[in-house]
Image (tube, helix red, strand yellow):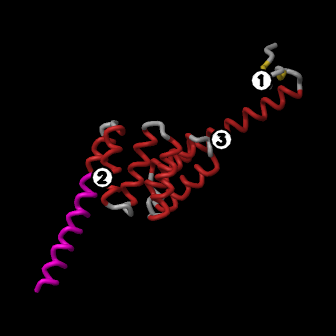
Amino acid sequence: YGDHRDLHLSLRRQRQMCIRDRVYNLIGICYVNQQNPKEAVPYFRTALRLNKQYSEAKANLGSALLMMGKVDDAILQLEESLKENPKNAIGWNSLGNALSQNTQLKQAQTAFEQAINLAPKYLNAINSLGVLLNNMDEARSLCRTMRKRQQKGLVRTTSDGVRVWRIK
């Protein structure tokens, strides 16, 4: 009976730990939903301290860090989360947002496409991909315009490498 009782207590503690990590994660989500990511981060970190393999808490931490403007840290958390749970469409969308803020546009496009492949009706990912592609097209168009103006002598480069548009 002694071994059985020890096993039972051990399983009960593990179950409590599983519940506790989810509770901390949910509290963090509440703060994120209230647009208060700074308050959310400690709860996500506590959930991860209790369960290092909790990919949802890693993704949520990444999203909170992104909201705080800590883009590089967010990318690391989101990538780690997606290694453990590559079928997380929300995580792929968050990674795409972080990568686009970090001007890694091709990688962001891939992340948004992955989110859409996993959840074809996921409107946030569809909209994010549309905005990204539109911005990429505008950037290409601006580069073409700049090249044309440069060829016509309407753009000059200063000694410190800054391009200046001449207005006629």
Q: Which picture quadrant has residue 119?
A: bottom left
Q: Main secondary structure of the magenta part?
A: helix
Of the image marks 1 and 2, the number of the one nearer the N terminus: 2
- List x then y, in percent, for residue 91: 45, 54
In the figure, 94 relative to 21: above or below? above
Q: Amino acid at mark 2?
A: Asn
Q: Residues within 10 Å of mark 2 (few under 14, many from 20)?
A: many
Closest to the observer, 8 or 28:
8
Closest to the observer, 17 or 110:
17
Q: In the image, which disc is placed on residue 109?
A: none
Q: Is residue 155 visible?
A: no
Q: Amino acid at mark 3?
A: Met
Q: Which residues are magenta?
A: 1-25
The answer to whether marks 1 and 2 mark residues whose Cβ atoms lie closer than 8 Å is: no
User: Rounded to the nearest whole Å, what is the CA distance between mark 3 and mark 1?
Assistant: 22 Å
Regarding mark 3 in the picture, which secondary structure is present there?
Answer: helix
Residue at x-position 53% and y-position 49%: 96
Residue at x-position 84% and y-position 30%: 148
Q: In the image, which disc is placed on residue 162?
A: 1
Residue 121 located left or right of residue 54: right
Q: Which residue is mark 2?
A: 25
Of the image marks 3 and 1, the number of the one nearer the N terminus: 3
Q: Is residue 21 visible?
A: yes
